[in-house]
Amino acid sequence: METNKEPELPRGENLLLAMHTELAISIVNFRKIVSAGCKWSIATFYRKLRGRIVVNGDGVFKPVLSEAEKEMARSVFHAELRRLNDWYDKYVERSL
């Protein structure tokens, strides 16, 4: 029979380690999901991340990210923030 006890930290009692681990997981999730959504390799993700400004032969700046790529990044970032907030509410807020 299941009881309604408060959730325990998924990685033991070390709150700092658990929080750091969740942030690291979030970074990897962000990279994987954005890369898959934009059909990029990991190398392309990091090239885009560095974001060098490119000027074409006519002297016109070429944006580093297309509007669709920007929207993908915004959407994934927002989803990861929600996931982190839910994790915080479940494991940290209740332990205060």
Image (cartoon, grey):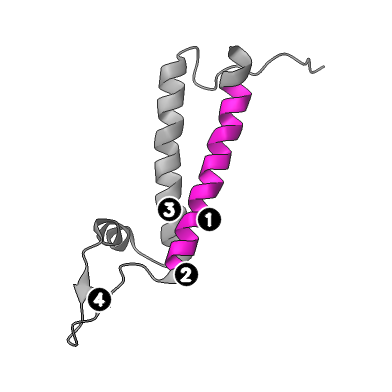
Residue 44, horizontal then vertical, whole percent:
30, 63
Q: Is the N terminus in the top left, top right, bottom left or bottom right quadrant?
A: top right
Residue 45, horizontal then vertical, whole percent:
32, 59
Does dot 2 land on a helix, a strand or a loop? helix
Choose mark 1 or mark 3, whichever is in front: 1
Does dot 3 land on a helix, a strand or a loop? helix
What residue do we see at 57% from left, 39% from top?
83
**According to the image, label 3 marks what residue?**
32
What span is colored magenta in the figure?
A: 69-91
Farthest residue toward the right? 1
Residue type for callout 2: Ala
Graded by Cα atoms within 10 Å as few (under 14), some (14 to 19) or many (20 or more), the crowding at tag 3 reads some
Residue type for callout 1: Ser
Residue type for callout 4: Phe
Q: CA distance from mark 3 to mark 2?
A: 17 Å
| Callouts 3 and 2 close, C-beta under 8 Å | no
**According to the image, label 1 marks what residue?**
75
Looking at marks 2 and 1 on the same chain, the residue that comes earlier in the sequence is marked by: 2
**According to the image, label 4 marks what residue?**
61
Choose mark 4 or mark 2, whichever is in front: 4
Q: Which mark is residue 68?
A: 2
| Callouts 1 and 3 close, C-beta under 8 Å | no
